[in-house]
Image: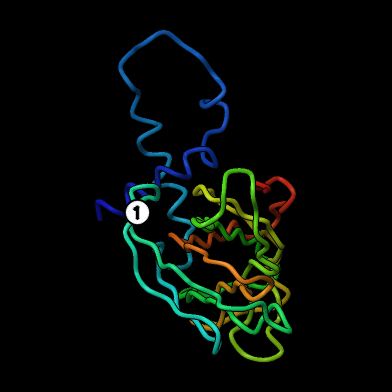
Amino acid sequence: MRNIARIAAGFVLLASPPALAQTAPPAPAPAKPAAAAPDILQKAINVPGANWSFYGATQTSKAVKSDGVPGGQAVRVTVKEKGANAWDVGGSSPVQKGIAAGDTILVAVYLRAPMLKDGETTPIAFLGATDSVEPYAPIANTSVDIGNQWKLYYASGKAPKVFAPGTARVTLHLAAAKHVVDLGPVFVLDFGQGHDPAKLPKN
């Protein structure tokens, strides 16, 4: 539970952005910010953490520890060669709860490419959430270029249909380049009906 509380702290910005923008003289911390992060995690429809599995003949993976991410756990994936398709190597993480058609979904993943030099980036061709069976209907997706420092990357969208519990997953396509990628904790948040994905965090 302590690790989950530390992970939740990364989402204080989603719960109370005005508080981050304010400057005030030192004073005892109010109770509200401490409660804000757990409130965000109440929207989680996965089990937040570095719960990753991988496929692809040209990859190897291993668990690593890192003080740079909440919970201190990550998985390092080495992609030995660029694939003919970006999806030739991929990672996934389960979404345990169901999703209603039209729900607004936010995926947030800690990523870095630790072998890069400062200022360099490497491509992740697909980051998002999809159906776990063909034709892998997308729920939220984007592409990102990641650097050598930990950062939260986001994808958001609306569910095109009903997803029963356990039938959606977070998906990353990793074969767009030969590279080493660290995947940290992943969060999938369901903001329900009538929420505009454009108002959620962007990369």
The residue drawn where x is 66% and y is 48% is 200
The residue drawn where x is 62% and y is 62% is 105
Q: Is residue 21 left or right of residue 4?
A: right
Q: Is residue 124 left or right of residue 73?
A: right
Q: Residue furthest left?
A: 2
> 89 or 140: which is nearer to us?
89
The residue drawn where x is 62% and y is 78% is 81
The residue drawn where x is 64% and y is 50% is 120
- Per the image, the residue denoted by label 1 is 66
Q: Quadrant of residue 33?
A: top left
In the image, residue 48 above or below residue 41: below
Element on which disc 1 rests: loop
> 109 or 157: which is nearer to us?
109
Q: Is residue 20 left or right of residue 142?
A: left
What color scheme is it? Answer: rainbow
Residue type indicated by callout 1: Ser
Q: How far across and down, in percent of the image, does residue 171 sit?
A: 59, 74
Q: Quadrant of residue 146?
A: bottom right
Q: Residues within 10 Å of mark 1 (few under 14, many from 20)?
A: some
